[in-house]
Image (cartoon, grey):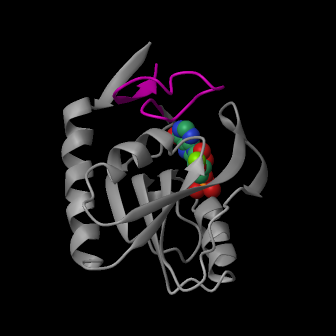
Amino acid sequence: MIKKIISKSEIKRKIKEIAKEIESDFAGKEIIMVGILKGSFIFLSDLIREISLPVECDFIKVSSYKGKEKGKLKIEFLNSLSLKGKNVIIVEDIVDTGGTLNEIVKRIKKEKAAVVKTCALIVKKKKIKCKLKIDYSGFKIPDKFVVGYGLDFEEKYRNLNYIGYIK
Ligand code: IMP
Ligand code: MG
């Protein structure tokens, strides 16, 4: 059973707020939004449709969890667009220890992007173990495993239109 903690309408409202922030920070500019697969695919697709700037999209594939336990981190750079001189926003579903996003920021900085910003729908605030700045963040939640709206437990529950705990 899933206990709902963030509803579909709260997510929608939060995405509009994040989109407004991005639009004002990058007014008159073009951006590339790089989604971290698989978890961010729903968030990214809803977010870009709220942004009225010219937006390009690309993806990085990361698999880090086996069930609820952390497995070995595997990062595959699928991005086909050149990020050199571009305004890049990395889009993540959830930040736990921050290890994944931190690694990706370091790697994208090597591509000589003009600006590298980070965006995460959910942040487990107390757990971040590295010096990671999250420029655009949605919800701060306690340290519990959540599913839905792209987030999975053993590949299931990504299709829920809300976010919740597994009970
Ligand atoms: P980090 O590297 O510890 O920040 O872990 C981030 C990654 O772990 C995210 O991209 C998710 O794929 C996964 N993850 C962390 N917490 C959760 C959760 O509560 N539910 C589902 N996936 C999670
Ligand atoms: Mg992820």
- Residue range of the region highlighted in magenta in the rendering: 147-167
Q: Is 102 situated above or below 61?
A: below
Residue at the top extreme, as displayed = 1
- Given residues 104 and 73, the one toward you in this image is 104
Residue visible at 59% across and 72% down in the picture? 130
- Report if residue 87 lies within the magenta region: no
- How far across and how far down the image is residue 65, in percent? 70, 40
- Given residues 137 and 140, the one toward you in this image is 137
> Which secondary structure is most common in the magenta stretch?
loop
Residue visible at 58% across and 21% down in the picture? 156
> Quadrant location of the N terminus?
top left
Callout count: 0
Q: Is residue 20 left or right of residue 104?
A: left
Q: Is residue 125 visible?
A: no
Q: Is 57 situated above or below 160?
A: below
- How far across and how far down the image is residue 22, in percent? 29, 68
Q: Is residue 55 left or right of residue 157?
A: left
Residue visible at 23% across and 41% down in the picture? 12
- Given residues 112 and 13, the one toward you in this image is 112
Q: Is 89 situated above or below 57?
A: below
- How far across and how far down the image is residue 121, in percent? 39, 51
- How far across and how far down the image is residue 107, in percent? 69, 74
- Report if residue 149 lies within the magenta region: yes
Instruction: Examine the image and state in which quarter residue 54 appears.
Output: bottom left
Q: Is residue 48 visible?
A: yes
Instruction: Examine the image and state in which quarter residue 28 appears.
Output: bottom left
Q: Is residue 53 left or right of residue 142?
A: left
